[in-house]
Amino acid sequence: MRIVFLCKRRPQGKDLIERPYGRFYYLPELLSRKGHDVQILLNSHKYEPHIELKKGGIRWNSISLVSQGPLAYFNNVNKIIKLNKPDWVIGFSDTYYGIIAQHLAQRHGCKSLIDAYDNYESYISWLKPLHYMWRRALAKADMITAAGPQLAEMMQRDRSDRLAVVLPMAADPEFIPMNRYNCRTELGLPQEKKLIGFCGSLYRSRGVEFLFQLADRICEIDPRVAIVASGRKEKGLKIPPNIRWLGYLPDNMVPFVLSSMNVLLVLNRDSSFGHYSYPVKLYEAMKCGIPVVASETASTSWILGGDQRYLARIDDLDDFSAKLFAALESRPPIYKPTASWEKVADKLEEILLSRI
């Protein structure tokens, strides 16, 4: 098959040309390894030159929105699809790419697939014309895929005759169990403490106040427990002294952070975003063999197989405290098996071949 992927260059802030990351890199790369002709057309939001190269068996093409203007990416994609006539055009990583993928695939007689890992309509809820175009593209695409069943059900609401397929998230290969003592030494973390980790953005809009309240509760109950956070921080936000903030760490240090923890805390809000979110940090912690306690949404419950040991009621200090202390004293967890990127790529290949 000839497959063209449309994607922003830096999903989750990770530059796909510089390093492998997530479904945006591994699914195209693994399809290329299987012998398919794969091209990724990237849209950069930074001022940088047009890039064309071949790497990892994939042809990469990156256009800068800033230096070349808003229509340059669309025109570039249109030209390449018209010239190469791929079997599939796949929209990754954002609303815009799904819309463009479906529109240009239909224009040039190709099949279209739209993939989503979040509820994109929750990002800019007031931008109704964009959401209308997104829903229209979902209804007309030849196939849609989603990171979990709740999101898949939402995306297929206007597609009664064609069901969405679940392509779950997975942990990248660098997430493996590692020696806790060595990881803490690498990060300068205390060996004698029981550590609860939080990896994510520290922003008021994302409910960081609950994390602060929970830290107060935990440290008051047992001073032998410490809270460690890593990730981006909102400008001007003051982090309480009972939370040790490691800053926004390089990607290669994140596995060390997870393997330093006794428990990983994953928080979500009761919102149109939170209920369709499939946090990759859960998959990464599970791959590292770390106990987790996550806000109980339909999506996190699906990831964790409904196991109430790992799920706490949203914004409930008592339930989170109880679950965290139970996790600190528990034996190493035995999670239900999760998919690898290899298995997810096998499933994607299967559905693409089935519709040729």
Image: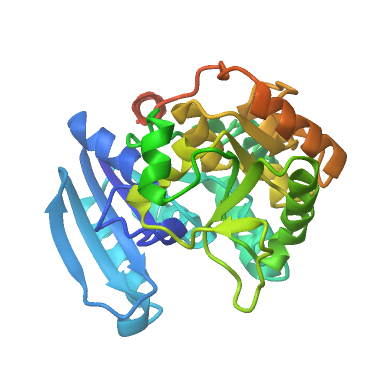
Q: Nearer the viewer, residue 129 or 219?
A: 219
The foreground one among 110 and 80 is: 80
Residue 340 in sight from this viewpoint: yes
In the image, 141: left or right of 320?
left
Q: What residue lies at 80% left-to-right and 41% top-to-bottom?
A: 221
Q: Nearer the viewer, residue 84 or 321?
A: 321
Q: Position of residue 199 (x, y in %)?
A: 55, 50
What residue is shown at x 51% (from left), y 34% (from top)?
Answer: 285
Q: 40 above or below 172?
A: below
| Residue 316: % across, % down | 85, 43
Task: Pick the quarter of the image with the C terminus.
Answer: top left
Which residue: 71% across, 66% down? 205
Residue 143 seen anywhere in this rendered image of the structure: no
Q: Quick one: quadrant of the N terminus? A: top left
In the image, residue 158 lies at what x, y percent?
A: 68, 43
Residue 67 position, x and y percent, is 31, 83
Q: How is the image coloured?
A: rainbow
